[in-house]
Image (cartoon, coloured by chain):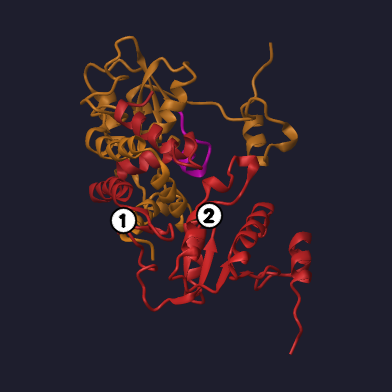
Chain colours: A orange, B red
Amino acid sequence: MYTLPLARLIEAFQKLPGIGPKSAQRLAFHVLKQDQTDVQLLSSALVDAKAQVKACQQCYNVTVEALCEICTDTDRDPTALCVVAHVQDLYALERTGDVRSGYHVLGGLISPIDGIGIDQLNLQALLGRLQRPDNTVREVILALPPSVEGDTTSLYISRLIRPLGIDVTRIGYGLPVGGDLDYADTLTLSRALAGRRAVG
Amino acid sequence: MYTLPLARLIEAFQKLPGIGPKSAQRLAFHVLKQDQTDVQLLSSALVDAKAQVKACQQCYNVTVEALCEICTDTDRDPTALCVVAHVQDLYALERTGDVRSGYHVLGGLISPIDGIGIDQLNLQALLGRLQRPDNTVREVILALPPSVEGDTTSLYISRLIRPLGIDVTRIGYGLPVGGDLDYADTLTLSRALAGRRAVG
């Protein structure tokens, strides 16, 4: 066995997802060779992120304040709301620069097989936002993945929200830009066909 | 961009080898969900390992003392010495339980293309150990990989040490246990043929 502080570091690395015994060992030996400053930076970044980062009280984005930067941004379109499964999806959409509305992060998708039901998701909070007397949202844009879970969740939300008189739309699915028909899987092609539009 | 403490954590993870932007993001989000205790453990394990773990003054194994556990182990065979490139190799050999001698960790292999010459390796220290008046080592076992760098380094060490009247051997190379001839690469088969032995 390695000397104790090294063994403990390898063990701690192994608790991270996708890091097996070999990778953990490689990372630990790298740390021994790394600059003292870099090691200190990672060490305090871990504690700081854990202590300071929390979920936005309104949309469940990551934030250090009560409300996130997007929820407090007065330039956002108040008539729409974009629903995503994970915080990472929110930032993927932000990189397009095409979403002008605020967001709502569900924290997952309905998936009975993984034990994720409607109570594990931030659905009640979504409904609450839309039912507020001062609600201005007229369209909810579902940006959920094209999967069984994504489809189920989209359908569920749609049935939940339509009765409020709010439009529910879902982002388009089909061939990715740069994608080759010949290499696309059957399900993607089916979605692309179903999502066809008039030309010109 | 993510909120600052999260962005900093992602950045710090990316400095580790084999961790790209996507993996760093995945690890950082995992940390946010992880138990406070586990995060604290990793954070302090990093600082502790960096501060406490150093190279053994004699063999360059990892240790928290001046000399490592193997160098201070009086049950080791003092007539042999096993030379490895990296500390990880030392522990791979220890797991066999077949090495009864001490070790010497070179810290790499001679590789002009990577700028690693004889001065970057712990070769002078190896020679020093063998030239001490109280030296008891009669055989140096080279456990270096079968590569251009491993071969060069083996040859160099052999020429350095043989004049001292010490035997220099190198571990066997060939087909790994469980390996299939049909799937072995040409170089491994060449080594296996060259390393053939009389049967029975």
Residue depicted at x 51% and y 77%:
B98
Q: For the residue marked with disc 1, what is the amino acid? A: Pro
- Front-lying residue, B131 or A50: B131
Work out how far the residue at label 1 is from the one at label 2, CA to CA, in angstroms. 27 Å
Residue placed under numbered mark 1 in the picture: A5
User: Do pointers 1 and 2 mark residues of a single chain?
Assistant: no
- Residue B31 in view (yes/no): yes
Q: Residue A170, percent across and down?
A: 48, 27
> What is the quadrant of residue B176 in the picture?
bottom right
Residue placed under numbered mark 2 in the picture: B123
Chain letter belonging to callout 2:
B
- Front-lying residue, B88 or A16: B88
Q: Residue B148, percent across and down?
A: 69, 53
Q: Please tell me whether mark 1 or mark 2 is closer to you in this view.
A: 2
Give the side of residue B44 with respect to residue B82, left or right.
left
| Label 1 secondary element | helix
Q: For the residue marked with disc 2, what is the amino acid? A: Leu
Furthest residue in direction bottom, as rendered: B200
Chain letter belonging to callout 1:
A
Q: Is residue B60 rendered magenta in the image?
A: no
Furthest residue in direction front, as rendered: B133
- Front-lying residue, A159 or A80: A80
Give the side of residue B2 with respect to residue B21, left or right.
left
- Front-lying residue, A39 or B63: B63
The residues colored magenta run A142-153
